[in-house]
Amino acid sequence: MAEAAAALLKEFEAAKREVESARQHVEETQKAYERERERYAAAVETKKSYADEVDVLAKKLDITLSEVTMQPEYIVEFQANIGCYQCYVHVDMSSSSTVPYLQLGSTSNRVELRTSPEHILVDVALDHAVDLASSVVRVQKDHVHVRIPLTSASKENRQSTMTVGLTARSIPRAQLDVQEYAHLHCRCCQANLMTDSETPWTKALPLPSSNWMEMVDFWGAAEGAFEHIPRDGIDAAAGRIYVGSADLLLHRSNVGNVVVATPEPSISSTQPTQAASIKAVLLCAKCSTPLGSLQNGTNVRLFKHCLDTTASIFHSYTSDSVLVVQMLEVIEADGFFRFDVVDEAAADGARRLRVQVLSWDATIQTSEFPTPQKVLKVLFAVEKIGPNESDLPSKELTATTALIDDVVERLQRSATLLPSSVVAGMSKGSIGFLFG
């Protein structure tokens, strides 16, 4: 009996150990399951985060592609003489069945070019009211051309208030505020161009165009009405700023940190061409950038595109401005629209810039600069100095080598604003824009 009880107890203990082992196995299995469950949850979360990241990247890619392919570069040219806008959109839709169309934007002066209700190719604000019903949209080989005429009322209003040439380029009010000239610097190196005087300026006054003396006789009501006006030009006065269309006329005593280069002739928009005095080129004493000229030892002429002020009132001026003013003065005084811009230091084989003004009352807007900018639309070519083969009259202008180089570079860059198919086939030059 005792032996049977001992055997039964032994069997019970063995069973108990098996149960304990099984329980431990279950616990280990449960722990392994929990670990795998946590790993699975982490994997699901990681997958979700990766999916979210892919979605974000996909959206960014869609936006980038939309900006590149669906919001192309454009140029809008306002042709005041015929009262319409010409818009060229740099996108190839010749193989697409989609036909772009125009509609008014969120405000009355905004016009949209769309390919669908959801997609806008171009969204631009125009200065004048337009007649969308009479507009024409043409899909060309490498661009979309849109012609948008003004409304009849807008054309009449435009004609009654139309100003062109120098009249449309009046001197901004800010440039006649003497406080704006508290600081005058070289735009290239920011060197101070004033003398040590704390308050060198007392007045800022506008200058007439360089052909003003030719018009004096028409201003007076009687013979000799303006005989008291000096006939040899306007001289600088100490403490005064005379503001021209593209330059400033200052007295030498108020200008510092400039050095005089070798005397040579130069074009001027503040002095009449009859002035016989030799003009010397003025350079910045710090960076040697040509800033303007010195005449008669006292008359300093500084180009606006070379200057900077505290409020940057000359930031929009470029080297184009100098030639634009020269050309407009000739157009208004003599009626010439063709120009030969010759290097002052011209020698045998030197180049010249030939320019024919096609429009002198145009403005353009681009995808980079959507605000309208006044321009001269020109046909230009760079040629070697030689006999003028054209029988058409032209006016010769002279400019420094640096100015011609800069203007030619800017003209060539502006020529890319128009689609290549628009300007293809022109053998006598390229179409570009002079800004100013």
Image (cartoon, rainbow, N blue to C red):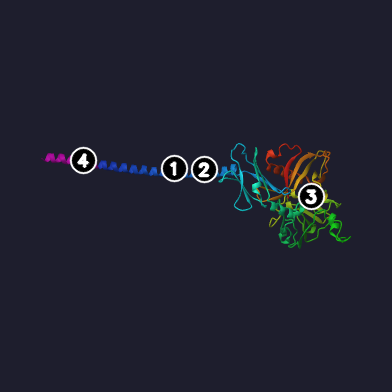
Cα distance, mark 4 to mark 2?
63 Å
Which one is in front in this view, the residue at disc 1 or the one at disc 3?
A: 3
What's the amino acid at mark 3?
Gln
Q: Position of residue 77 (x, y in %)?
A: 69, 47
Q: Position of residue 19 (x, y in %)?
A: 24, 42
Q: Nearer the viewer, residue 17 or 149?
A: 149
Residue segment shown in magenta = 1-19
Q: Answer with mark 2 or mark 3, whichever residue precedes in sequence.
A: 2
Cα distance, mark 2 to mark 3?
54 Å
**Quadrant of the rendered image containing residue 299:** bottom right
Cα distance, mark 1 to mark 4?
47 Å
What's the amino acid at mark 1?
Lys
Cα distance, mark 4 to mark 3?
114 Å
What's the amino acid at mark 4?
Ala
* Helix, strand or loop status at disc 4: helix
Q: Is residue 3 magenta?
A: yes
